[in-house]
Amino acid sequence: MKKELKLMKGNEALAEAAILAGCDAYFGYPITPQSEVLEYLSNEATKRTGMVVLQAESEVASINMVYGAAGTGKRVMTSSSSPGMSLMQEGISYIACGEVPCLLVNVQRGGPGLGTIQPGQADYFQAVKGGGHGDYKVLTLAPSTVQEMVDFVGLGFDLAFKYRNPVMILTDGALGQMMEKVLLPEQKPRKTEYEPWGSTGKTPDRERNIIYTLSLQADVMEKWNQRLQAKYREIEANEVRSEMIDCEGADYVLVAYGLVARICQKAAHLAAEKGIKVGVFRPVTLYPFPYADLNKLADNVKGFMSVEMNAGQMVEDVRLGVNGKKPVEFHGRQGGIIPSPEEILAKLEEKLVGELV
Amino acid sequence: MKKELKLMKGNEALAEAAILAGCDAYFGYPITPQSEVLEYLSNEATKRTGMVVLQAESEVASINMVYGAAGTGKRVMTSSSSPGMSLMQEGISYIACGEVPCLLVNVQRGGPGLGTIQPGQADYFQAVKGGGHGDYKVLTLAPSTVQEMVDFVGLGFDLAFKYRNPVMILTDGALGQMMEKVLLPEQKPRKTEYEPWGSTGKTPDRERNIIYTLSLQADVMEKWNQRLQAKYREIEANEVRSEMIDCEGADYVLVAYGLVARICQKAAHLAAEKGIKVGVFRPVTLYPFPYADLNKLADNVKGFMSVEMNAGQMVEDVRLGVNGKKPVEFHGRQGGIIPSPEEILAKLEEKLVGELV
Amino acid sequence: MAKVKGDIIIDIDKCKGCELCAAACPQESLELSRKLNSKGYHYIVKIEDNCTGCTNCAMVCPDGIIKVYRKTEKKKEQIATLTNVTGDITVTVNS
Amino acid sequence: MAKVKGDIIIDIDKCKGCELCAAACPQESLELSRKLNSKGYHYIVKIEDNCTGCTNCAMVCPDGIIKVYRKTEKKKEQIATLTNVTGDITVTVNS
Amino acid sequence: MTEEIIIAGFGGQGVLSMGQILCYSGVMEDKEVSWMPSYGPEMRGGTANCIAIISDEKISSPILTKFDTVIALNQPSLDKFESAVKPGGLLIYEASTIINPPTRTDIEVLPIEASNEAAKMKNIKIMNMIVLGSLLKRKPIIKLESAIKGLEKVLPERYHHLIPLNKEAIEKGMELAEKATVTA
Amino acid sequence: MTEEIIIAGFGGQGVLSMGQILCYSGVMEDKEVSWMPSYGPEMRGGTANCIAIISDEKISSPILTKFDTVIALNQPSLDKFESAVKPGGLLIYEASTIINPPTRTDIEVLPIEASNEAAKMKNIKIMNMIVLGSLLKRKPIIKLESAIKGLEKVLPERYHHLIPLNKEAIEKGMELAEKATVTA
Amino acid sequence: MNEKTMTVEDDLHFEQMIAEESVCTKENLVYERPETLTDATMHYCPGCGHGVAHRIIAEVISELDIQKDTVGVAPVGCSVLAYNYLNIDMNGAAHGRAAAVATGIKRVLPDKYVFSYQGDGDLAAIGTGETIHACNRGENFLIIFINNGIYGMTGGQMAPTTLVGMKSTTSPLGRDVATMGNPLKITELVAQLPGTYYVTRTAVNSPVNVRKAKAAIKKSFEYQKLNKGLCFVEIVTNCPSNWKMTPVQSNKWLEENMLPFYPLGDIKKPSN
Amino acid sequence: MNEKTMTVEDDLHFEQMIAEESVCTKENLVYERPETLTDATMHYCPGCGHGVAHRIIAEVISELDIQKDTVGVAPVGCSVLAYNYLNIDMNGAAHGRAAAVATGIKRVLPDKYVFSYQGDGDLAAIGTGETIHACNRGENFLIIFINNGIYGMTGGQMAPTTLVGMKSTTSPLGRDVATMGNPLKITELVAQLPGTYYVTRTAVNSPVNVRKAKAAIKKSFEYQKLNKGLCFVEIVTNCPSNWKMTPVQSNKWLEENMLPFYPLGDIKKPSN
Ligand SMILES: Cc1ncc(C[n+]2csc(CCOP(=O)(O)OP(=O)(O)O)c2C)c(N)n1
Ligand SMILES: Cc1ncc(C[n+]2csc(CCOP(=O)(O)OP(=O)(O)O)c2C)c(N)n1
Ligand code: SF4
Ligand code: SF4
Ligand code: SF4
Ligand code: SF4
Ligand code: SF4
Ligand code: SF4
Ligand SMILES: [Mg+2]
Ligand SMILES: [Mg+2]
């Protein structure tokens, strides 16, 4: 089968990628701006691969269906947008604790509350610090192109199974709605073999498999946590991904994830036209966050500005990475507004370039 | 009426304080280790002040009942523990966005997942960074004595109404279950006057009052966010509270909140016996976090160790405060285990004292 | 032509041209105009003078933009008979 | 005393002394012992030899710790009459 | 070559599909493309716009505030985006319905009476294709054949019998563009 | 004065209320007090313990690992907490049921046959009060009257007729403590 | 009325014309938009039943003169902006939680009239728990349930109430009972609960049905005053946009397809 | 059996004694703990019905020999540790979500036997939405609903099923209909839904009821094999600890108070 080049909407491309990744089941609930995922799958998936597609009665139900289905060792996913994702927080904490691999997609919109349906990035904290209770981590991928909306589905499932951990694609409404060229991967077969840990029916050759998250004994629960933490250290050692664009020789670095990183690139071009050397640092994995790369970068630049579609969230991680070596500024837009390249440059000049000369 | 001295369990003291604060309504759902709040109120409240006490069908329902009732301008509260709090995240985002003052109590237990019912502090991120979607802040108070479990109820309601913002008391199962002496405040009357913004029925003399969180227009939603952010700046300017114990002249500072801060004090006494000068820095408000105080303190000490009943959450805020000036170490226990004074001292010696001499 | 008993006023600028009123009108008095209002909708116009003021149209109008009027006609009662009138006369009915 | 037809075995160390078995036993065969087991519970003992093996006790035991046995007695049929025996004899019944 | 275009108008005028056709056509010619709609409540009956970028290089920001070409199909869109044309850029507007024409003089302004022309062709829906034709005349970003192929992708199968009519419309647009008085 | 005590035993032995009585009594005498139960699943039938601190100063940590006094009412508790007695501290244990006595020699060890004594007094429930009496004899942290008042607080109203019996038990405990062979 | 009668086409000056002649005089006014509706143009699609539902609620509030004592709860759904149209105090609940929000309000303001207004996705999918339990507790407020068999706001996904075989963006081949289950008659369910006092199903597709729906709402407020418990008024409506029909077609389709499955009338009548 | 018959008091050597004589021989064994129960001692309070319920589930699984094809879902409630006692693959759902978890499992493993085991707080309070919708979709699994009228695990708070007047830690004066509503008969509700195939109420307070409950569970698994849709078996049980009674008293109280309100028997019988 040859790979196919298509022009697709981000949401639909992501849904198509799920089918091609051999995803076994999707459970979700409509919410703008990501309903196309559920709709596309409702149209396409079952007839093509037999994939299960179920519109649940709520996001709370969706995430718990995911917990059940993924607990059998199948490739299972859900998607939602900000308010819906908030409703999933208890479930995500369970999934992480139970070490159930699965793929979660948050097509963020402007918040808080019901907010707007336009794009946002204000669920960063929720995704990477843990909106649910307890110490757990969700491996978080931030695509910045429609192509990555596709690629990160396959990657996401692979990482999820590698670490038996939930993986989240943290994207936004603009990426979900925009169209770009994508090269689709080949169709992967659906899973036929059981995972050794999956809850699928106890056969005589093995002990029973239980997916659970409780311990009555605090010391047992602490050991459990230590096991999780050890896994997280491993993820932090192996899976940090970031992209540096023109950071070599740059005086200033814009830090941004997802779509905003591309807008920052444009801003950097505009800056270059003005003779200001600006690089762009794009964390691709938000957890694990590329602290070390930023820290190293801090030795060679004059300052950083984190640009986000929120009131200042990732900037804290940037500061933790830079650890006081250089100033870290912030520019953000909220409520569904996307910053423009011109505006980013202006803010950079105002906050850093102006300050530091 | 004279103030009364009692020996009370933390949870019951908090419930009693709610009655005495003239709280108008409590909506909640049982969960260990905080069910005593609902139980105490079910026994005492209605007959004494006519306060509404309702066991809801779930935490999702509880928080939305709070939203409705508090949206009328009454003094309203709920309480829960970790998993239940996760289920409230969507509602809390709405409440913060709709600027509905109310009091939330999280008696944390060991997580993640169903976890244990023993005490924990692993919902720090959820509380102060925002477990729900969007940019919002919940003013977060961390009591460390049963007396503060009482005092922060009144304070919490006052702050909630001052800023029209949700306030959370972030405590843990141990504080909820332990008994100490408390001085109870006098009975405050229930509210009889309407707030000018409360949704209570439109009278001819005013425009209708609407509690809502939506804007179809991104620019309107951005202004809304800016208004919220301005309020948060004000809270950050006015409401930072912290306690420093023996930090004057200390070489090392233990940073801890809630009960753990008291254990750290004991550890500091043990250290003093060994000739190590250790102070304790206790953030009382977790949001707003006392960054500036820590930053100043960093000039005079050799290093910090954050001690938490989690895998490392508040330590990030400590690092943000210290901003690279001095090393910041971490010691944590998870899953419901409480660190002991001896262990804390040992870790301090291992991680800082040993390293830095 | 039947005696006119009712009338309606439509706030045409708010009309969305859904035609539910027209479908509900027993007198078939209403129809879409060919013109657009400022919102870009074809709006409803009365094309017949046979409105009875039954309020059906207003009942179903989702945008609540129809006012209905109805003349409560006094019942006619014969109070005198006038015959063989050949010249101009004035008759005044008291009350 | 009736003919013994059934019997039970209780895993007394797992017994929690709830007495539901005793309450369910139609023969009133069961009672709490005065001793404690290793878990600190008074456990159930059989005090009568009249068990019919009806399984009632096992049915209601929440801890599933009762085994029940029942002798399926062969129906007795008269196959011969032996009278006036004065000395020792041996009678063998085939099958 | 990089061409950054915004197309704006009423919901029903086909602004979104115009952008999509451009992008599909770009794909046919192996170019990099990006199509970014404004989405949200305004789509319900109100105004809509999309940004289409066609380029030989990788596209960074799909969100822009300045454009090589602005296509405005109604008055509010013209009012909103006239200032967004880069100096020296192109502004096309639907001249049969827009009453207040643009005033900038540092750009190329192309008025196209596309609605009138579409009415003449007895299908108001093809108005957008006329405008597209005008654009392609002025800026041959993509070839006509590619545009037709792009159209095939955007039009649902059941409307494919309308392709000849659409082609005609594009050609009509090209014709109009030639004749139009371009102010600059 | 600061007295740090842990009381441990089976769920039904009244270890939690013993600690509470101590604390209530402390309040009566205007002392600082802290009572911290172990809570959780072990409470259902299993073992339980509580830490009671009575002090003239403000109490920092209510959680401790070393104690001035350990009271162990069953074997597992003794096994678990023997090592938690501070050197020179006091260890009281229920000697009628505990078969393996403590072995430490750097502390004061007080075996009390409280269960047997309670059985003699025909109310096994007052076993804990006998032990309390022994403690108070050995360490008069609080006065007997205060303890009685504390008891009044802990006992639900409907059991107040049992107070004289409880008082008797405390006194019996004091008597036993006097007679007991203390090893140190 | 003669040929000069104003038609809406000759815009302008009609006030004067009315004054001059015709039946359009104040005393002849028999129907007018209620004051409890604001002047804002509703954002609903042309012909959408939400508008009628809003209007009759406003009429009832005006007629009972209870504006100052009424608090409404808007859902998340197409009617999310109900608070822009009803000139009363309102709360905008999170999706599905209107019954919980209304419970909160009513419990602290027991003397006020409280109602929630909810779509079928809101009430019968994500809000099932809150709905059932508010009904079961017999909360003393009114639930107005707008059943259009679809998720309107999000663009036409299947709702719990979508009819068998009915197409939606998430049931592209029509609702399939085997995988999606039957349409949920939640109104019949809540009628089973002793906490509900008056449960009825109405529609707003015809003048007579509009009048009945309004009467049901009015009765419900009257029962609320008497503390009778929960009243539940379902209104079967159309969604021309997502049903992909003209408004007139949609009302016909409603009559022919929705009403046979969701028959109109009282499901639980008050005992007295 | 003679005087030497072993009683459990004379511990030791009984194996031999059995071997020597008595009816306690392999061939006479008529009842034994099923293999599908693990050896772990259940953490339930003495006399708690959960134990019996577990046991009969295990018996059915053993008898049908479907251990290798069965996946169970444990709730959050006293039976949260069910996976420690049932020797089968299981998932521990979040509180109230067992029906959603079971849906997820069954949808991806349609050929397996799936069941959820849920308390009344879990199923009928926080899990109402998931319960109703799984039933409405006619998910092809079994829900076993343990109704003990109380929140056992958290220490005796009022449940949706708590009887009127029944005391709990959150209804200290007894359940008050005016503020807390009536006990919720969710079993009768789900029986109304076309998606449920077999809905029945059983109890485990007496040997005969235990046998009936077991038969209902067995039938349900058989129906599941035939893809009949959702089977729902309520088991009315006791909670001696929180009812503050001895186990024997609690079963009597159950008989006299619970069963009149929650009558036993089939509520929805399969058509064939
Ligand atoms: C938690 C959450 N999930 C999903 C949504 C998206 N959403 C908004 S309205 C709606 C459903 C609307 O359908 P319905 O309740 O039937 O109302 P209608 O628009 O048909 O009147 C959904 C799923 C949301 N806003 N919040
Ligand atoms: C989200 C959440 N809320 C609350 C709890 C606390 N909780 C645990 S079990 C339970 C109820 C148990 O009652 P029931 O379902 O009737 O089961 P039972 O113990 O009676 O068998 C509750 C409220 C929880 N674990 N998670
Ligand atoms: S009032 Fe009646 S008759 Fe007159 S236009 Fe309206 S529906 Fe027709
Ligand atoms: S019903 Fe109302 S909105 Fe619809 S066409 Fe008639 S007047 Fe216009
Ligand atoms: S088997 Fe029957 S008769 Fe024998 S002890 Fe058990 S209940 Fe009693
Ligand atoms: S029913 Fe079982 S646990 Fe209960 S007393 Fe009898 S044997 Fe023991
Ligand atoms: S989408 Fe449907 S329900 Fe929503 S406003 Fe339009 S017609 Fe009404
Ligand atoms: S608390 Fe009740 S339900 Fe739970 S184990 Fe004990 S008796 Fe059973
Ligand atoms: Mg709907
Ligand atoms: Mg229960």
Image (spheres, coloured by chain):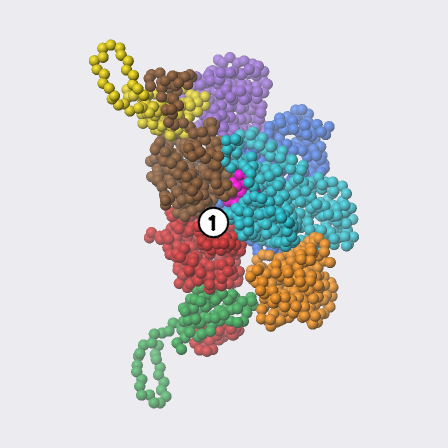
Chain colours: A cyan, B blue, C green, D yellow, E orange, F purple, G red, H brown
Reply above or below: B305 against F95.
below
Residue A340: % across, % down: 68, 54
Asked if residue A66 lies in the magenta stretch, the reply is yes
Q: Nearer the viewer, residue A258 or A271?
A: A258
Q: Is residue B179 shown left or right of residue A156?
A: left
Q: Is residue B261 shown left or right of residue B27?
A: right
Q: Nearer the viewer, residue B24 or E136?
A: E136
Q: Nearer the viewer, residue A185 or G72?
A: A185
Element type at mark 1? helix
Q: Quadrant of residue A273?
A: bottom right
Q: Amino acid at mark 1?
A: Met
Q: Work out whether residue E30 can be spotted.
A: yes
Residue F3: % across, % down: 56, 23
Which secondary structure class fits the magenta region best?
Answer: helix
> What chain does badge 1 belong to?
G
Q: Quadrant of residue C71?
A: bottom left
Q: Identify which residue is drawn at 36% across, 52% down.
A: G268
How many badges with numbers are in the image?
1
Circle 1 sits on which residue? G180
Q: Is residue E167 shown left or right of residue D34?
A: right
Circle 1 Cα neighbour tier, 10 Å, few/some/many (<14 / 14–19 / ≥20): many
Q: Identify which residue is drawn at 38% across, 30% down.
A: D60
In the rendered image, which quarter contains the C terminus of chain D? top left
Q: Work out whether residue B201 can be spotted.
A: no
In the rendered image, which quarter contains the N terminus of chain D? top left
Reply above or below: B355 against C61.
above
Q: Identify which residue is drawn at 43% across, 52% down.
A: G142
Reply above or below: D15 against E61.
above
Q: Quadrant of ligand 3?
A: bottom left
